[in-house]
Image: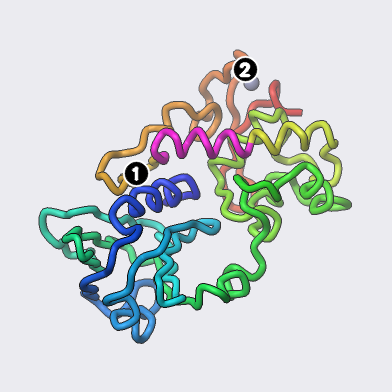
Amino acid sequence: MPELPEVETTVRGLARYLEGERIARVTLNRADLRRPFPEGLVQALTGARVTALGRRAKYGLVHTDRETTMVFHLGMSGRWRIEPHAIEKHDHLVIETGAGHVLALNDARRFGSVDLVDTAALETWGPFATLGPEPLGDDLTPAHLRTAFAGRIAPVKQLLLDQSIVAGLGNIYVCEALHRAGIRPDKEAGRVTLPALKRLVPAVKEVLAESIAAGGSTIRDYAQPSGELGYFAASWQVYGREGQACGCGDTVQRFVQGGRSTFWCAKCQK
Ligand SMILES: [Zn+2]
């Protein structure tokens, strides 16, 4: 499933082809993904100039000079194909730019989505209205987490996955950041000390930044816009490594927490 680093990688890849470009043609090859494509999508985008691309949580943002933003979510299996040799079965939305570039939103399982939102109203748009700060932004601080965790008995891992506390963090990155910060995933959030939070915030940012730098990680067949596969998986310290040695020499353990696998090291994480 594309996580924040993959979405960021995708957005950066798309920007090379879309930023400043006029959209010459938009083709929809079916009526819906997870839900129907917005009414008027083709008309809204055709002839518009893309002013900038961006990301909020795991959503990609394509801003246009019509004060409208196309918001996309890659769901479970979505990816953008750049300059495909041929349009394939699952290329549901195809954009051609004035410069002749072709970009296809491919989503075999169709858990993704595309929406049109007034650019000025993005912050209050339904899915964005309750989101917490971006993990890579300046608003994610130890003080923010201290306030959000105060008095909470829920496990720290569960609260880090709460999008209203931090936007866009997924299971892999939370496991890795908690390991890097030396915090047990099942520790009561309200009992995580300030020194630990001061380790956790940079750990979150580092894990994400390293993954973005590596071009986005992959579990199955996630491909970058360039078509290359990501390769950060090789440098995970605990995720997916149950029974293998942690860097400290102890063994990585797994347990199920809130329906998802948590990987951790009992020696490194207190
Ligand atoms: Zn360890």
The quadrant the C terminus occupies is: top right
Residue 76 colored in magenta in the image: no
In the shown orientation, is residue 230 left or right of residue 145? left
Reading the image, the residue beneath label 2 is 250
Disc number placed over residue 220 in the picture, else none: 1
With 164 as the anchor, is 50 left or right in this view? left
| Residue 108 appears in the rendering | no
Foreground pick, 52 / 152: 52
* Cα–Cα span, label 1 and label 2: 28 Å
Note whether 55 is above or below 5 in the view shown.
Answer: below
User: How busy is the neighbourhood of tag 2: few (under 14 within 10 Å), some, or many (20 plus)?
Assistant: some
- The yes-or-no answer for disc 2 within 8 Å of ligand 1 is yes
Q: Secondary structure at mark 2?
A: loop
Give the residues in magenta: 204-217
Ligand 1 within 8 A of label 1's CB?
no
Q: Tag 2: residue type? A: Asp
Q: Secondary structure at mark 1?
A: loop
Percent position of residue 63, x then y: 43, 67
- For label 1, count other residues whose C-alpha is less than 10 Å away and answer few (under 14), some (14-19) or many (20+): few
Q: Is residue 215 magenta?
A: yes
The label shown at residue 257 is none
Q: In the rendered structure, which amino acid carries the disc numbered 1?
A: Arg
